[in-house]
Image (tube, grey):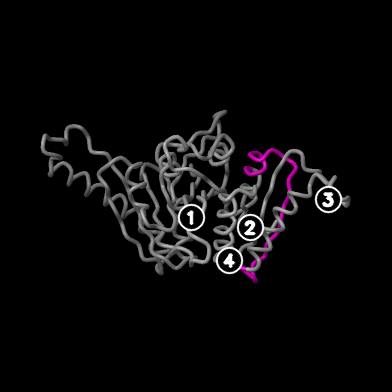
Amino acid sequence: MQPAVTVGLDGSPESLAAARWAADEAEKRKLTLRLLHAWPLLAPEPTRIPSEIDQNYWARRLVHTARAELQAAHPGLSIVGNLVPDDAGHALVQAASESEMLVIGSRGLEPVESYFLGDIGMSVVARAERPVVLIRAETRPQGLPPAPTGNVVVGLKLHGPCDNLLAFAFGTAVARGVPLRAVHGRSVPLHARVPWGMDHDISEEIRQDAQKQLSKALRPWREKFPQVEVAESIVLDSPAKAVVQACEGTGLLVVGRREHRHTPAPRLGPVAQAAIHHARCPVAVIPHD
C-alpha cells in the first residue's frame, strides 16, 4: 500500500474537520489521502442493487460527498475511499499501522465533555502504532479564510528516547515551512518553595540543568533540519500544564505516549491526557519506546 494519511470518517462535523485537515497535510507531505469509514454491518463486497435495499448506500454516499469536496479544494491530491466492514476502533488501529498518520475528529471542551474521545477514540490513541492526530470541529463561519497554520509545538520529557517525537515534529515543521518550539516542563521540588514563591538559586539551577538537557536532545535534529527555526522553552511547572499553556495560538501540538506492548489495557500518560482533553489546537500523539 502506498504511503497515506488516513482519516476516520463518520459524517460528524468533527470527522469532516479532520478530513479537511488531513487533506491539507497529505498535500503538504505529497501523500495519498485515505478516507476510511468502518461499520460492522457493511456488506463485505461491493453491491449492485437498488439504493433502497443497499446497506452500503449511505456509507458510500458519505465517503463520496467528502471526497468530492476535498478533491475540489485539492485538485492534484490523490484521494481514495475505503469502506471497512469492521468495528470502528479495530479498523482505525489497523489503518494506523498502514499509514504515515491517522487523523480522527474530537469534540467537547466543557468539563462534562472533557473525555471527548469516548471509548473508541481513547483506545485508538492508546493502541495505534503510528502517530494519531486529533482535530476539533471547525467553528469559523463559512466563507471566511482558514485560520493561520501557526507554528509547531513539541512537548518533551527528556527522561528517555524521544527520536520518534522529534522526527515527527521537525518533519511537520519542514512540510509546513513554520518554526518549531520545543517545550519542557519541570516541577519544582517542595524544598525549593518559600513563603514568597520559589528559592531563586534552586529554581535557577533546575532551569539551567533542564536547558542543557533540552539543547542536547535538540542538537542532532537542528543539524539534520537546518532550515527549521527552533525555539527552546523551559517551564518550571508540571509537564502537563506546560504543554497546554504553550499551545495557545499554535498550529499543532505534538506530544508522546510511551508504548506498553505487554499490558492488556494500553493507557495514556498525564501529558498526553492533558493535551488531548484541554488543548484547543490539533494534537498529534506519537508512540515511542
Left or right: where 144 falls relative to 44: left
Circle 4/circle 3 CB separation < 8 Å:
no
Amino acid residing under circle 4? Glu
Residue 27 badge: 4
Circle 1/circle 4 CB separation < 8 Å:
no
Q: Earlier in the sequence, mark 1 or mark 4?
A: 4
Amino acid residing under circle 3? Ser
Q: Residues within 10 Å of mark 4 (few under 14, many from 20)?
A: some
Rounded to the nearest whole Å, what is the CA distance between mark 4 and mark 3? 33 Å
Amino acid residing under circle 2? Ala
Circle 3/circle 1 CB separation < 8 Å:
no
Residue 275 against residue 169 in the figure, above or below: above
Residue that mark 1 sits on: 139
Circle 2/circle 3 CB separation < 8 Å:
no
Could you say where residue 129 lies in the image, as x and y percent from the top left? Answer: 57, 44
Q: Nearer the viewer, mark 1 or mark 4?
A: 1
Residue occupying the point 49% across, 44% down = 288
Amino acid residing under circle 1? Thr
- The stretch drawn in magenta includes residue 244: no
Q: Nearer the viewer, residue 221 or 150?
A: 150
Q: Which residue range is magenta in the image?
A: 73-93
Residue that mark 3 sits on: 51
